[in-house]
Image (cartoon, rainbow, N blue to C red):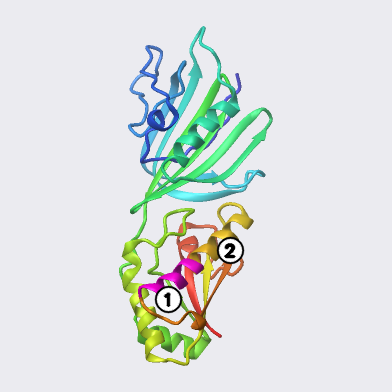
Amino acid sequence: MKKRSIVLLFGGLLLGLAAGIFAASHPDDAEGCQDPAQFTRMPGYHIYHCEEKQFDRYEVPVGSDFKTQAHEGRYRQIVYWINEGATQASGLQIIRNYSNAAMAVAGKKIVEFEDGGVHYVTLKIAKGSLETWLHVAGHGGEYFVHILEKQLMKQDVVADAASLAGSIRETGKAAVYGIYFDTGKWDIKPESEPALREIAKLLKADPALKLFVVGHTDNVGAFDFNVKLANYRADAVVKALTGAHAIAAARLQPFGAGPTAPVQSNQNEEGRAKNRRVELVAQ
């Protein structure tokens, strides 16, 4: 049977817990190979091949046309084959099990498609400073899992009210990188409070200032979802400022630009991190 190289990047979840799968090791497992600690295998399968590298580069499929993005980090690959006499799962069943497991821990589906009888899914999970990508390819009698885990840099330096005001005077806008959300979510995380305080300070220092609060995303995932996500995040920032910080609602208007106004290339993680931002634009 022809082996197709496929990608799965994933971490921080138990597939067995989320999908109801508990499969033990099998005597036919390749020597030295075992399921990752984060999740188990589909029942009735054994490990044909595995490899691990502490640091490597991997091209992750993010589009149904096999468009990819490069990521670097801890890399693992596992190839599973059906056991003799076992009931074979369909490719769709395999990727849906992994999708359900990922979504149960707030994972975001990047793309799902079928090509030549193989079903593919790519998912992303961000938890704390760890970003894990998961792309699974199911072909019934075999399926492929590649795991890439990367540590994200925490943004420790937040622009203060004076520098935000200066940027708005000079360019009409100011980018804010200290407002945090979980992947695919729009609930503002508690560590965003220092940045929110500086925005409130900016507005209180200049009572005539009115702002568009604009949400921006990278280009990973569906365009319509990213635009909606950007809108919801911008609205969440406005609600935080008008609520806890007592800024008049008439001074703020949320807007979601999604991935339409990048400041750097989306071809690498550094650029995508810069593109995920909130901007304050003078009205």
In the image, which residues are magenta? 235-244
Q: Position of residue 150 (x, y in %)?
A: 38, 49
In this view of the protein, which residue sits in the foreground, 158 or 246?
A: 246
**Disc number for residue 259:** 2
Magenta segment, prevailing SS (helix, strand or loop): helix
Indicate whether residue 240 is drawn in magenta.
Answer: yes
Horizontally, is 63 left or right of 152 in the view? Answer: right
Q: Is residue 86 above or below residue 111?
A: above
- Residue at image position (65%, 34%) is 114
Which amino acid type is marked by label 2?
Answer: Pro
Residue 242 is tagged as 1
Residue 139, picture quadrant: top right
Q: Amino acid at mark 1?
A: Thr
Residue 212, placed above or below residue 273 = below
Counting residues from the start of the chain, the first of labels 1 and 2 encountered is 1
Tell me which residue sits at (44%, 29%) in the image: 19
